[in-house]
Image (spheres, rainbow, N blue to C red):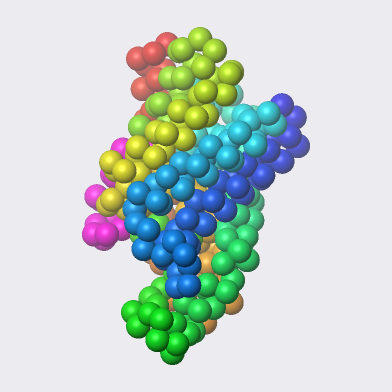
Amino acid sequence: MSNGHIVTGEIFGTAVLILLGCGVCAAVTLKRSKARDAGWLAITFGWGFGVLGGAYIANGYSGGHLNPAVTLGIAIKTGQWSKVPYYLVGQLVGAVIGAFLVWVAYLGQFSAHMSGLEAAEGRDARPAGPVLGVFSTGPEIRNPVQNLLTETVATFVLVLFILTQGMTDGLAENGMGILLTALIVVGIGLSLGGPTGYAINPARDLGPRIVHALLPLPGKGGSDWGYAWIPVAGPLAGAAVAGGLYRLAFT
């Protein structure tokens, strides 16, 4: 894979991942969305399908990492680091693009949500609230140690699952591995996503958080930069543990 192919594949794949993933968060959160209040099950499957679509799009060009934690785990497994910067650039750029496209797709809903139009029309008297949750994760109980451990454990499961796919003949080559990875993302969301919203991907959280900070949404609330390091450090730590354990136990 050339460096250009890696960057291009990761941009397109990660953009689709974030568009569908943050898109389902917007659908469930924003006023005047037909899917409002669809719940956690909808969110977890939305992110799973985002992984499925994005990884299939990127697979032929870059291998479809879409996640700095996955890239780190694979680099530790293989000992090949030269391509890592190209993956990281593509992933962050793609995440920013995907989050921006969510805002474009839900522009009317963002306006209604932020302006209080619903209450004025008598459609929905509930407070609008901040929209950071459409873009980035946040803890239900703010405890940095617990939050960091949750993200570390959840990402460890994801990355170890991906690394061990190569132990089954043909699984990584025939495309079935992508489907199974999408399903494990759904499973992680259902089982381990409750405490923090399961970033399990530094680019997934950081890119959209940057977009939230830059968007012209009056009254949108802060971008919670004090928490932003956890969905970056936790997934990277989980990936490092998974990669190291793979080398120790599976090779």
In the image, residue 236 sits, relative to residue 111, either above or below, namely: above
Left or right: 216 in relation to 72: right
The answer to whether residue 116 is magenta is no
The magenta segment: 139-156
The residue sitting at 45% across, 28% down in the picture is 180
In the image, residue 115 sits, relative to residue 162, either above or below, namely: below
> In terms of secondary structure, what is the magenta stretch mainly?
helix
The answer to whether residue 149 is magenta is yes
Q: Position of residue 141 (x, y in %)?
A: 24, 59
Displayed quadrant of residue 57: top right
Q: Is residue 148 visible?
A: no
Q: Is residue 19 visible?
A: yes
Q: Position of residue 97 (x, y in %)?
A: 64, 56
Displayed quadrant of residue 3: top right
Identity of the residue furthest to the bottom in this view:
120
Q: Position of residue 194 (x, y in %)?
A: 28, 50
In the image, residue 129 sits, relative to residue 85, either above or below, namely: below
The residue sitting at 45% across, 73% down in the picture is 31
